[in-house]
Image: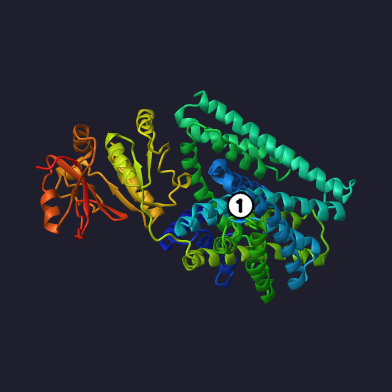
Amino acid sequence: MIELSAIIVFGILAQWIAWKMKIPAIFPLILLGLFMGPLSTLFLDNQWINPENIFAGNTMYYFVSLSVGIILFEGGLTLKFKEVRQLAGVVRNLLIFGPIIMGLGGALAAHYFLDMDYRVGLLFGSLIIVTGPTVIAPILRSVRPKKSLSTILKWEGIVIDPIGALVAVLVYELFFVSTMSVGGDHSLGLTQVALKTFFLTLCVGSFFGLFSGWALHTLLKRNLIPHFLINVLSLGFVIFAFAGADTLQPESGLLSVTVMGILLANIKTPNIDKILDFKESLTVILISVLFIILSSNISMEQLKLLEMSSLFIFLTVVFLLRPIVVWISSWKSELNWKEKAFIAWVGPKGIVAAAVASLFSLYLMSDKISLPPSLREDVELLVPLTFMIILGTVTLNGLSAKFVASILGLIKESKNSVVIVGANEGSISIANYLEKHDVPITLYDLSKENIRNAKAVGLNVIEKNILSDDEIDFDDAGHLLALTSSNDVNIFACRKLKEVITDLNVYRLITVNEIKFDALSRPSNVLFSSDSDYINFIEIVRKHPVLNELEINSEEHLSSVLENKDTSLPVLIRRKDNIHFITVDFDYQYQEGDILAYIGQLK
């Protein structure tokens, strides 16, 4: 009980530390798992955390497999075909050449530097095929490179995971089942085994994924699921897809849940934002628990097996194999050399590599299988070597990606587009003005009527919950205006999105309580004035729906204009190619040519 509780509590603590330090969460999670596991034997008689005390028999195997399935389903929900159409060639090549080059290259490196048996070497090579979507996502949020780069890395990171697991199964079937009589059907040749395993996995995984996704979509579209059961029932469908596929064909579950997630994301499934929000929270908990469990399950004896030669394998993977994969995959694409270099640099390994390595190690080292002593030693090295690659790539990419992107000039200095939460009358007036002056805008709302009104005047409006930040393109966003009628939505949107995108300027309307009670502190990002709440904002807009302009000739001039609180609302200062929204604590420094845009009329 105490060990399981410690894993959950410390896992969540590690997530908070990672957020505070702006690093991928996997980094502190693995270190914490090693410290609570094998490294704790340096000052304790027994391991502080021993997963064998928590999971009996094959329970750990099942828990890890199912958890990874849920994580991949959540990733699949973020993949939209429309965003990858122009980049399909590069993504396709990464999914084809990546497994071949990384798998064979990793095997050769393990054999050359560690004298590892070719069978275990190929199994290791298949494990490092995958990247880490749970690591790449926070890196991309921190760096915020071009949309094309984010799309390529996100698609590769999620889709290549089931491919890597499939390749690992093929290697296992070919070189352990067929040649060593380790369970399974031994009557078939190597080619027949590979083809049978590949097609069975592909067909079973695809069938269960498509069927489960279609069934859940149909129930949601026909409103046959009560609101309070949407999340738990969707989780049930994910578990059914994973377990059903995995039972018929081992290791096809990862493919089934990825296919299910991609299907739901691309057929306009109702309430998908609600499902995604729930799965994001669940994924955070699962990742926290999984990494601590898997890393604490490594023994001190296994860590001692790592030699200096292991470092050469890491260097080969990062500085030779990954660049070759990207260079070949992006050949004759529209990507320039800087963009290719950034993609080549960001290739961290993650939860799937750790989980699959642990699963195969648990199975091959079990009492049911008798391996030769030399081969058993190589299998013992499989998990610590994989974790070393994971920890090394996470550390290197997580801590240096933004610096590398800055050197390559892939971080945009100026982000001037505006995201507006709420497509009401006031939002439409401001959006119309911004579009007139060539400022890109995007409105987000869930109201059918508001969306219809915004589209009627030709505005870019999206029906989506903006708090589902992983689903929304903030590539060029420099400002966010929270203008809904809900104070809670405005406050929470500003708070959450500011945490996700640190250089995003967020603004909101003042709340009724902030107006009534002077004792309440008022943040500096409150728009317009200290007494202009939603009702006041909409009333003035209804009388004066079009923004007016006034050229400012001094700081004193603007101060005098801002005193017209009863009949006008100052919105922004337009200065050459930049805009500056006016807030209660607006610090204005006059420049010639400044234009004030305001709603209402001046006295």
Quadrant for residue 565, please give it: top left
Circle 1 residues within 10 Å: few <14, some 14–19, many ≥20: many
Is there any visible trace of residue 60 in the rendered image?
Answer: no
Q: Is residue 390 above or below residue 201?
A: below
Question: Quarter of the image containing the C terminus?
Answer: top left
- Please name the residue shown 28% across and 36% down the image: 485
* Residue 367 x/y as whole percent: 77, 55
324 relative position to 120: left or right: left
Q: Nearer the viewer, residue 506 or 170?
A: 506
Residue sitting at the far bottom: 308
209 relative position to 499: left or right: right
* Residue 176 x/y as whole percent: 82, 55
* Residue 199 x/y as whole percent: 77, 41
Q: Nearer the viewer, residue 384 or 207?
A: 207
Q: How is the image coloured?
A: rainbow
- The mark total stands at 1
- Please name the residue shown 57% across and 69% down the image: 39
* Residue 319 x/y as whole percent: 63, 69
Amino acid bearing label 1: Glu
Q: Which residue is mark 1?
A: 156
Q: Is residue 333 above or below residue 82?
A: below
Is there any visible trace of residue 259 in the rendered image?
Answer: yes
Q: Nearer the viewer, residue 581 or 545?
A: 545
Q: Secondary structure at mark 1?
A: helix
